Image (tube, rainbow, N blue to C red):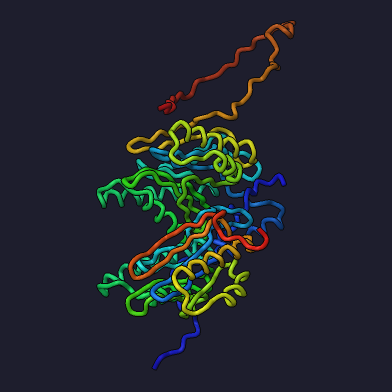
Amino acid sequence: MATLTVTRPPFGGFSFENSKRNAVLEGNASKMGFNLPPARKTGTTICGVVFKDGVVLGADTRATEGMVVADKNCSKIHYISPNIYCCGAGTAADTEMTTQIISSNLELHSLSTGRLPRVATANRMLKQMLFRYQGYIGAALVLGGVDCNGPHLYSIYPHGSTDKLPYVTMGSGSLAAMAVFEDRYKPDMEEEEAKQLVRDAIAAGIFNDLGSGSNIDLCVITKGKVDYIRPHDEANKKGVRTGDYKYKRGTTSVLSKVVTTLDLELVEESVQTMDTS
Amino acid sequence: MLGETGPEWTTEEVKTGTTIIAIEFAGGVVLGSDSRVSAGESVVNRVMNKLSPLHDRIYCALSGSAADAQTIAEIVNYQLDVHSIEIGEDPQVRSAATLVRNISYKYKEELSAHLIVAGWDRRDGGQVFATLNGLLTRQPFAIGGSGSSYIYGFVDAEYRKGMTKEECQQFVVNTLALAMNRDGSSGGVAYMVTIDEHSTEEKVILGNDLPTFFDQ
C-alpha cells in the first residue's frame, strides 16, 4: 500500500537557506550601529574586440570597496588557457575564483582530448556554472581567444546568458566604452588599430565612470602568440609635488649638546634573512 | 547620483524582451524574431538571433529570461541529438516540443522563459507548438514575448488558412515590424527562418528594410 508522505521530498541542487540568515545578520548588525564590510567589487570597464588576426582584450585596473579604491593596480585579465584569456567585472572574488576553476577544468579537458582548448568550450563551462548558481555568483565576463576555428569573443552575464559578438563591453563603464566602439569599430581591423580602439574605449570608461580608473591593461591574442601588456597605458600617473615641506639642516641652531651612554648587556642575537626573491 | 551603481544590467537580470512568431504553411513553417536583449533600460545586445536550432529541421524561438531560454534550448538540443541517434532517424517536432515542455513544466517556478518550437518532419509536415508555462499545444501560428501583446489584434485579423510560403514570410515580417515599433523591449533587426522538407533558410532583415506603416 502506498504511504502518503506529507514531508517535502529532498530536491537536488542548492539550498539558499543561508541567504535568509545573512539578511537577518545584516539587519542585526545595522541595529547595533555597524555595517558588515561590503564585498570588494571591481567597478570596472572591460571590453574586447575581434580584429583580422585575433582578439584584443582590455581592462582598467581599479578595484573599489564601497567608495574607497582598494587596489589601484589590480589585474582583471585572467588566464584561462594558453590561447584563451578572460576579463572579469563584478565581485572581485567571484571573477577570480570562477576563472581559476574553469581554467583548471579546461586544462584537464585539454589533456584528455589532446587538443588545444576551444573558446566555445570555455564559454559553455562558464555559462553552465553561472546558471547553476542562478546569478548569486556576481561574475560578468568578457571571454576571448583564438582556436582552431579562428578568433572568438563572448560576453557572459552573471545569470548564465552569453552573447557571441565582434565587440563587447562590460562593467560599470561599459556604456562609455560601447559608445567608442559603436562609433569606430570596423570589421577586419589591423592589430595596431584594434589596440588603439580598445585603449580609447577603456580610457572613456576610466575618465567618465567613477568605478573605473588607474591604468589600461591590454591582452592581444593571435594564433600562436599572446601579448599581455600590463600596463599598456598609464593613464593616471601620480603627480610630482611642486613644493617641499622639509627644512634644511641648520635652520634651527644648536645651543648645547649632552651625551649620556646607556649601560646595556647583549643577551641574544638572532638574524633572519628576508626573502627578496 | 555619486554612487557607482553603474548601468542597470550590473544588477538587473538580462531578459530577451522580445517579439517572436511562428506560423505553419503547407509543407513547412516560418519563424521570426526581433534581436534586442535588454537588462533594465540598457540594451546589452542589439543583434541577438533568438531563433535557435534544436535540430536540422526544428527550430525554437526564445523569449523571457535570456539565461533560462538559452539554457533550455541548449539542453533540448543535446537531448534531441541523443534521441535521434537512438531512434536512428530525424526526430519529430512533437518530440522536441515535448522535451522543451517537460523542462518548462518541471521547473516552472524557477524559470521564466517561453519557447515556441516549430519545424518540419516527415510524418506531419510543418508544425508549430507553444510551450508557455508548461503546456503543449499545436497551433496554426503562435506569438510570444513582451511585444506579442501589441500584435494579437493584427494577427487575429490578418491570418488566413492556406497561405503560401511567401505570404507567410510577408505576414511574419509585417507582424514583427509592427511589434518592434510599439514595444520598447523589441527592436534591432528581424531574423526569419523558413523550414521545409528540402532546406532550412535563415534570413536577416535590417532595420531600414522592414515594412513601414502609417506613422513613418
Horizontally, is B124 left or right of A197 in the view? left
Q: Using residue A218 as the reference point, say whether residue A65 is left or right of it.
A: right
Spot occupied by residue B120 in the image (x, y as percentages of width and height): 37, 73
Quarter of the rendering containing residue A12: bottom left
The relative height of residue A81 versus residue B25 in the rendered view (above or below) is above
Residue A133 appears in the rendering: no
Q: Is residue B90 above or below residue A201?
A: below
Left or right of residue A261: residue A255: right
Relative to B57, A130 lies left or right = right
Between B29 and A266, the one lying in front of the other is B29
Of the 4 image quadrants, the one containing the N terminus of chain A is bottom left
Q: Position of residue B214 (x, y in %)?
A: 66, 63
Q: Nearer the viewer, residue B144 or A123?
A: B144
Whole-percent x, y for residue A215 in the image:
55, 32
Q: Dividing the image into 4 quarters, which one contains the C terminus of chain A?
A: top left
Residue drawn at x 42%, y 66% is B194
All told, the count of numbered labels is: 0
Taking the image as drawn, is residue B200 in sight?
Answer: yes
Q: Residue at x 33, y 73 (%)?
A: B91
Residue A115 x %, y %:
27, 47
Query: Relative to A56, does residue B138 appear above or below in the rendering?
Result: below
The image quarter containing residue A17 is bottom right
Q: Quadrant of residue A245?
A: top right
